[in-house]
Image: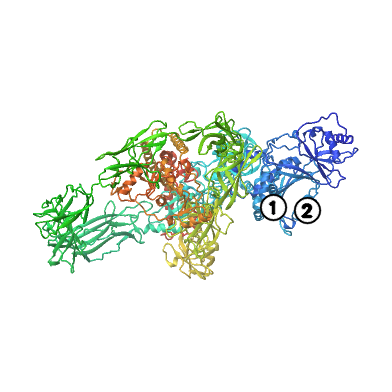
Amino acid sequence: MAEKQSQTKTAGLKSCQPSSSSEVVEGPPRRIRVFDCRPENKQVSDEVVDASGKNLEEFLQDVSKVFSVGKKETYVLTTTDRRVIDDDIFDKLEHGITLQLLRTADQELPAPTQEHIKYVPHYYTLVQSGMYEYYASEGQKSLPYAFAELVDNSLSATAKREGHRIIDIRLLFDEGQGKHAVAVIDNGCGMTSKQLNNWAVYRLSKFNRDSSTLHSDHLGYVRPSPVPRSLNSDISFFGVGGKQAVFYIGQSARIITKPAASPDVHEFVMSKEDFERKEKNKEDIYCGVIRNRKPGDHAHIVAEDELFLQALIAEEDGKDSFTAVVITGIQSDHITYLKQYFHLWTRELAHIYHYYVHGIHGNELSQSSKDNYKQSDVDIQITLVEKAGKQPRSVNLRDVSTDMQTLYINSSAASFEFRVQAQGDATVEGLIRYHPFLYDRETYPQDPYTSIGPADEEDDECLVLNPEGRGKRPIFECFWNGRLIPYTTVSEFEWCARPKKAGALPAECYNRISGVLFTNDRFPVSTNKLTFMDLELQLRDKETIFTRVINGQDQRVKIQREFTSWLKECHEQYDKQIKFMGFQGVTSRSDVSTKRLQHPWARFSSIRWDGKTYKAGQHVKSLKTLPLLFGTIKEFLLYGDHEGDVFATGGYVQIALQPKELYDEVRTIPILKIDRQATTAAIKRNIEDELAKLPVKLKVTWPEGTPWSDCETRPVGTPLGPIQVEILNKKGEAISRLPMGGNAAGRKFLMELKVIWHSPKGDIQTNSHIGVHSAKWDYWFRKMENLNKLGKYTLHLQTILNESNSTTWAGKQLPFHSLSFALKEGDAETFSVGAISTPLQVGVPFSLSLELKDEFGHPAHPPPDLKPKLECSSLEVTHEGTAVSGTTFTIKGVRARGSVTNKVHTLKVVLEGLRHDSQSVQISMLPGLPHSLRVHPDEEKITVENRTAVGFKVEVLDESNNITTHSKLIVRSQVAGVPEVPMEAVDCSNTGMGQLMSKPLQLKNVRNEQLITVKFDLPNHQMVSCVERALRVLPSSCVCRVEVYRLEGQRDAPMLLMNLERIDWTAGDALGNLFYRLYDEGEREIPITPELAQKIKVNWSANMKGVDVAQGRLPPVCVPTLAVGEQFYQVAFKGQPSVETSFIIMPRPDEPELLKVNLKETSVRLGEVLPGNIYLELTDQYGNKTDALSAESVKTISVSAEGLDTSSLAIKWQESTQSVCVSGVRFMDCAPGQREVRFAWQRYEEFVRLRVNPGLPAKIIIQDGPEMPVQVLNGQGVDTPFVLQLCDEWDNPSPDQRVVIAVMSLSPQLKVKAEVMSQPVNSEGKATFTLTQITAPKGEYKLEFRGKMNSSGILAPTVLVNVLPDPCKPVKLAVDYDIGALLFAGGNFPVFTVTVYSEDGGAVRGVNPASMSMLLWKGPASGQQPPPEALTLKSCKAKKTEKQECLYFRDKVIPERAGKYTIQFVLSVDKTKAIWSKQHTISVVPSKTVKLAPEDPPATPVVSNNNVLANRTLVESLHLKIMDEYNNPAGEGCNGQVFVSVKSSSGCSQKDRPLFEGDSSRASYPLENGESLIKELALAENSPGRDGTEYILVFEADILELTPFELPFRFYNDVENQRQMSALSQKKDRLSLSIDVYNSLFDTNKQLITELKGRLQLAEGKEKQLKSELQKKGLASSLKDMSEIDAQISQRKAEMEQIKRQPRRVCSIPDPFRTSPDVLGKVAHLAKVEDDDAAKVISWHLLGDMDCVVTVTTVAARKIYDDTQGRQQVMPLETVFWKSNTRPLPHIRNGMNIFVPLGNPVFARDLLIYPQYADKCQMVFGSLLGDTILINDLDSANHYRKGVVQSKIQCPTLLTRQGDRIRSNGKFGGLQNKAPSIEKLRGHVFGAPIPREYHQASSHVELLQQYRVVLEKCQMVRADYDSHVQYLQSPEMQQKEQELKEQKRELQDIEKKLASTPVRTPLSSVVKRPHSEPEPCRTPSKRARIKPCRLLGVGNIGPP
């Protein structure tokens, strides 16, 4: 068809004749670029040919003309993908397309051509831009996933290729070949130029691509058919990953591709450098050039750093189709990672494409599996080429055998397949694999990318890494279309989750499964294919169906039942856990109830369990038994007919209980009940401690350091005690109970104390106390201070038993202690005062008598040099001397002087030196004799006005100025030379005081002042001096005249208004500045007082301001607005006498005052002219039109307004209306809204309002947001949202909702997540963006907001973001310990100090100790993580002297086995992330040598003395070593001899003891380097010895003090007798073991019943208690079952959520520093305020401090200061001076109100609520607010301040709820003292606390949840108890009891036979062989839990 088309076109070109069939196509401009590629041209030329409105023939003519094509030449015109142009294709060609002029369609290009393309991002960039932000993950090395995006494209390209699909990844890091590059090459279908153009368009997914040059050829996306595991290669999906990957790896990408049907190669380059260049040059960024060339043509590669490209291009020859992506500009850290971790990231790629590489069954390494399954055809090869000469590293992903899926597949033993059908055709294929426990380890593979999460709360003391296989890792990995989605896992489904209740299947089996889910493309994933969006939600949907798949067929069965059955089969068939060793034969167990399980039971001497070995004779401790058992192992039992070593999942152990003095029995328990954490030393100590616990003596101490010795004498009253008593046992330990055997609690000890006084009348018990033991202070007796009798005493302490009060135990006296002492009299310590004759007179002498006594009232002589001191607060007291008479002490000549206002005075007598050195007595005092006169007033010259009274007060005083009385006390006064004033007298005999001259003076003719003298005296008491006073008499000051005047200015002379004066004044004006004056009779101006002002009256105003009148000001006179008539005005003084004056005002017209404006339209758009005219006219102020305006006035009229364009204004004179016309009003560059336009002429103006509408959108501004620059911690968000405003060109808001705003980062290192990444503006033109997470290295970055309307951009701002390191994010662990310390086995480690460092390099505080673990394992370092068997230890609490930011590991026990160990520390950050420390290798050395023993104990020899050497051989080969107590070889360097001898266990004589060969009783062997080999030790032939006797071989070393090794053996003379006794002994042992098992079973059941009953009682009691509390709160009415409780909880939680969602006041100040160490946060976030008004005014008052960051230390404050370059204000608490202030409000003194306050005053700081750091916040706000008081309103505040100040108290700052402030200096008013509205604070306000209803509902939820847990537990315990009681009463148990009785009888018969065996001498005693003590288990165990008996054994022992 192509050839025919070619012929048609060539004919057309030859003839160049227009075709009649072609029509001219009219349309938009269309220009086509044509390249002349004819082979005769060496260079390709191109021209643009216009095809607008032309048909094909016309266009061909133009082409011929442009390229000079001859008429006879034959050519074809094709697209770049070689499609020949015909009429149909030509009509569909688009503007800008590239064509090629060729000789033939398959002609080779003579030179490359270029095709210009555009790859503007598809609109999905905007629509789906948030997908990556929401679903991408952080925290993992993402470079392998970037490569995976390119591999996805290659897989899609090779999907339809037959044969091998080759994908070659080359890392070209050889600098000799040019710059570093990465090439991804595949042999896929290649891309046409259009497809390559599509690839360049960002977010152009396969569903929207037009892969053809012509739209008509686009068929759309076709979904592939379903295939197993969805391996359809349809994984190149979104049009995003390839671009993201190449620019993540490097900075430039070159795509070279050749489609299968084209001879041309298309090449396209995009680079960051090119983008930056185009942006700088203002070019179109999203455009480029596709180079079309022939294969192998590298002529365009000329740069030296791109030489490697020539080799790549040379490989193109011979390839049918291919695609190569070449990335350059590789980041340096990527190069380092790709080199150093080559095996890691290739392993991860192998994991991602595991099933594409290996097929649907995965990488099964067994050869049989490889033969059965067809291999995959996908071949992914990775090659790393480094410098020349170095062998390239190469790996094929098919050869990788360490990826996780390979490990899962090859470590599993069985699989479980299922299928999931979700909504529609969404399908999942699932597979679960089982990884069994083999021998001593879990086979579940360890994932190096998964960290161990924190331990369960109940097991936080015992965290073991990977203890149960999978641990807490999720089960399922998820694959999408066969490709791994790495960041999404599914933890489990309900049907495969571990059951909550224990069942027949062990819980650890659920941790031995792994799984994989294969989904099809109906489950959406993120664009980077790292996460599923909602996979788990869809799978957990109720409509989802799970079916099991068997042999490829779906089975509709109950999936949970099928899975449980499959898991049980796997456990029984594949798990092997415990290794039984040392087979000793087979026995039967009669204690087993089921007969078929009684035989056979194999006996073993040792087991190996979880890396530990347990042997017979080893001390062990039981776990989860009641009581705990201590003893030695006898043997191990395993059901079945076994021989030799064998593995099993469980078994039994027989334990001989220790010590024998208290216990004499053997118990059989399951092996699982061995406590693997208990050490041998601890068990031995427990046994020894049982025997050393009886009390021996009392230890008496005196805690306060005042001990009393025996027979000591002390003064009476000396305190005895306190006394602390301890009861000590033999070990010196304090005890409080009588020790008992086992775990039973002993009887308590009491301590009896008695004090006996040996009085003359007999012994009297003064004190008796019974002391009870306390854990803190043992037995404590307080001080006894009642010993105040003289004589001898005895203190007796006696130990007694509680309940019986017995002082003896077991016939022995319990410990006691006695102390004898005596008491004597004490010194004088107090005194009493004798009687005093009162009342006394001032100045009259008297005496005081004192009686001295000791402390208890006994008379005592005064001490020498006793000096009295007399004190009286109200009198001056003196004395003349003292006298002593016996016990009486007298003070003589006492005189008292002073005020006698109070009749009774307290006289204090002090005798220094006495204990009670003061006594007080009450005395009465009276005034003395008259001494002087006092006259008030006391001035020498007194001024008085005529006609007023003077009033003198006279007082008669004694020598102390007390007013005194006496007979004939008459005081008189007289004035000499003034007859108008008569003489006066007053009698003061009774009162001592009087009043004189109280009548007014009546002097005449007083115009000026006069001076007179007044004399006061006592005529009857001449010794009292007289007193004189001078009087200055002034004229009277009464008002007699008033004047009115007007004052224009302060410098102008006053204008006096004469009485009845007429005044002309402007109409409507006010005559102001009127004043008045008052004059007295002396023509003196009288100062105006408020009293005088009240008497001033005017007739023009009824309400005068008192303040103005008091200042002499009169109210202004308002002149009428009409200029007619006259007005009369009068001023009068209404006093005595009355005075008045008056004046008259005449009104006159006013001047023009008002400019009036008339207009029709009131709105105009910004930039447009207001329609219609505006008219102006001038009136006076009362609306009267004036003729002031004229045509000349137009020149001086002005029009102004904000934003008014004055250039368009026109002002004209309107003659007809005598007014001014204004037009052309237009506004420019102003904000929209109401606008006032000002019209003015001269001094007249008027305003009118016009509404201005906004213009078109032009730019975007940030209206509100966080403080700039934005400071945020790495990984956190910004709380304050960015509010963006769309504006016109004048910054006016423009509400155009066609504009869309997006947020994006300008730096590749800055990653931003927001709630919405792009959105249109709202109706107000605003868009809000909240940044939820910002991630970047420390530094400053730019964030850009981009706006777009239709296809045009809008100017938008950029934001500077300062990213700070997170001081709370741990990144590193530092370990410190004593490296040089010697570590002896079984000792304690030195203290390990671990410090957690954060991103900023500081130590992280507040790390949860439970999340930090210390891991210990034997052996060398194991890479990054420890082995699964590592022992885990927890940290200890830091001491007060240690750093609180560190974690400490102290007192950790060193392992008991010597050797190399490794220690590592791990911090669990969360469930998926942990931080590991470096691994530290330590050496454990043996401890002290203690014994000689073999490593493996030999069997007990049985020998005879016949002539056969084998029957006489005792030891064939025995290797003995010198060991420490933990069986570590410790004899290095020790040499000597080992001597072997025989001793008898039955005490037989020396001659009966067997002899060694050579008839020797002793043999010796060399001991070299602590080891000795004993070989061929045998008895002599016919050696002596008793038949059937047990002897002991003793191996002793001649060096050190070592415990010898003893080996028992049995000696026989008759071989046949030996065999018979051996058979009987074996049968006896089997019966004994069976009986022990039965006894253990019955004892365990009884103990379990007791325990379950106790637990049931506790649970029921707790349930009743909680139910009672619920009833009190009204919640127990409807709680009958769990569903009702859950309904109540859900209801309360819904209420809490509703309350929480209610709007309330919040603080919007960002606080990025709050999580930093030693940082409390910003002041605004430290407190909450409930009341809105209080919150507003307090926040405004502290507005300058709200943004201040409060730190604990100055170091933390300085760090913030440095990080913010000093922009952030900080306040360290350690520099704040604060003193606790408990003072009341200022108006309260001594608990009483000084005055009654108004407005509810309260300290402002008391209204603050502190969510946390209450003590520190009190310091902060105590410093900021001080004593600031909040009160209701301003009037109340002024009243309060006035009352406080008048009380002489400093008043603090006052705030009012209305927003006013009165400063501490009294100033108020003004804007600076008025709080704005709460909205204007812009979020800088204290937040409101959560309502109280929320906390109430929260407490209800907590109580209901507790009740639910208790009720559920109660039901479970009751069910267990009932089940076990029923089981104990079953026939099966009764049958077991009967079998036990029968076995006991059989055992007695055997013992009788053994006892009656015919031997020469009966056996007196048998000594059992001692066993060496192997290494005790060091693995920590879980806490013991009580379980039903069926979990204690195996088989049918226990209830079914």
Q: Residues within 10 Å of mark 2 (few under 14, many from 20)?
A: few
Circle 2 sits on which residue? 302
Q: Position of residue 1918 (x, y in %)?
A: 41, 39
The span from disc 1 to disc 2 (Cα, nearest Å) is 17 Å
Image quadrant in which you'd find residue 1295: top right
Q: Nearer the viewer, residue 1018 or 475?
A: 1018
Q: Nearer the viewer, residue 888 or 45?
A: 45
Q: Residues within 10 Å of mark 1 (few under 14, many from 20)?
A: some
1162 over 818 or under it: above or below: above
Question: Residue 953's mark?
Answer: none
Helix or strand or loop: what does disc 1 sit on? loop
Mark 1 vs 2, N-terminal side:
2
Callout 2 amino acid: Val
Farthest right residue in view: 72
Q: Position of residue 1650 (x, y in %)?
A: 39, 44
Q: Are dots 1 and 2 in contact, CB under 8 Å?
A: no
Circle 1 sits on which residue? 329
Task: Count the labels in the image.
Answer: 2
Residue 611 visible from this viewpoint: no
Q: Position of residue 790 (x, y in %)?
A: 17, 62
Callout 1 amino acid: Gly
Display colour scheme: rainbow
Q: Position of residue 1516 (x, y in %)?
A: 55, 63
Residue 1970 visible from this viewpoint: yes
Helix or strand or loop: what does disc 2 sit on? loop
1558 over 376 or under it: above or below: below
